[in-house]
Image (tube, rainbow, N blue to C red):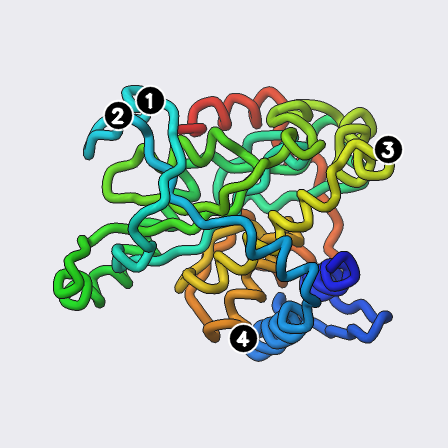
Amino acid sequence: AARAMEMLARVARAGGNGSESGGGVEVRSAGGRSAVGLWWAGQCVRHVIDALGPCGKASRDELPLVEAVPSDKRRGASRAAAGPSRATRGASPQACGGLVALHVRRGDACQRWALEGDGVVDPEGDCGPRVGRPCYAASSYARAAASLGSRRAARHEASVAAGGGRRCVAVILATDSADVSARLSALADTRVWHVHSARGAAWGGAREGVNLGVAAESAMGAFIEARNAAGFVNRSAALGASLADLKALSKHGRGFVGTSSSWWSRLALYALVGEVGLVPFRLLDAPMRDLWSGAGIDCSSSASPAQALSAGSRGRG
């Protein structure tokens, strides 16, 4: 299973960053350049997932898909009025007409709040504290998911009504953030399903918000790679949850929302395409071909930490 995940990571990273070879995998300009490249990357991911052995499949399949429902959710109520979310086993995501797979990366990967379309990534810290890894408000993901899901729900309204369902957007969520899950599940006409598993700090990742406003050199200690090397990460738990997330998103999603700067977002998109074919998708930061074109970063045009944090505090909801 670990070897399979390594192969999947190579496909995802190659798909965004030009090419990578070795270990039997070679993807050139895969998902980031064209619909054809996206389709081929999807097939690569599908074949690797299909080749999982019994242990990998067992660690993946033992984690159930559950619905996150705020305990006092009222349709139309504000997020602040809703109580903490709880996981329930019940109706399938198919009860809604709009099915959107959604990946939200927070934890160590969130160094500044950014607005949609801000695809500036400075992984080496060339701009000092001015530019960090961006993250986006839950409301940004919600708008994108609603846009994709509502169009599909409208097309399938007759079949949903016939099945006793209702016109709503079903979000299949993969995230390391409990805050995101609570905010999305509190929205009217949105239902959220996720794999029931420990997340983020619960299996040794960094706690959410630990790197906000922190310069690259100081933030690296909290990066998942550093924590894994130091032995803090429960690797089997993280691997099982990742494989289960990929299965849930690719099985139920009919659209996708994520970020091209995250290799796991790219992997989830490829898994979905490999399972069901080309689907509509939104990447909140920038298209893969733009983000990973190799162009230099213009530090002078980047927002300051204060500006980035201010923008994030206005749009976190």
Q: CA distance from mark 4 to mark 1?
A: 42 Å
Spot occupied by residue 280 in the image (x, y as percentages of width and height): 42, 65
Q: Is residue 317 above or below residue 91?
A: above
Instruction: Name the element at disc 2.
Output: loop
Given residues 224 and 28, the one toward you in this image is 224
Q: Nearer the viewer, mark 4 or mark 1?
A: 1
How far apart are the alpha carbons under marks 1 and 3?
37 Å
Label 2 and label 1: CA atoms lie apart by 6 Å
Residue at 33%, 55% in the rendered image:
93
Label 1: few (<14), some (14–19) or many (≥20) C-alpha neighbours in 10 Å: some
Mark 2 crowdedness (10 Å alpha carbons): few <14, some 14-19, many ≥20: few
- Residue at 61% across / 24% down in the picture? 209
Mark 3–mark 2 contact, CB under 8 Å?
no
Mark closest to the chain's N terminus, 3 or 2? 2
Calculate the distance from the C-alpha at mark 3 to the C-alpha at mark 2.
Answer: 41 Å
Marks 2 and 4, the one that precedes in the sequence: 4
Q: Is residue 23 above or below residue 247?
A: below
- Res 72 label: 2
Choose mark 3 or mark 4, whichever is in front.
3
Q: Are marks 4 and 1 in contact (CB under 8 Å)?
A: no
Q: Circle 3 — which element?
A: loop
Amino acid type indicated by mark 3: Ala
Identify which amino acid the numbered label 1 is placed on.
Gly
How crowded is the residue under tag 3: few (<14 C-alpha within 10 Å), some, or many (20+)?
few
What residue would you read off at disc 3?
230
Instruction: Looking at the image, tell me whether mark 3 or mark 4 is earlier in sequence order.
Output: 4
Give the residue type at disc 4: Ala
Asked if disc 2 and disc 1 are in contact, CB closer than 8 Å, the reply is yes
Q: CA distance from mark 3 to mark 4?
A: 40 Å
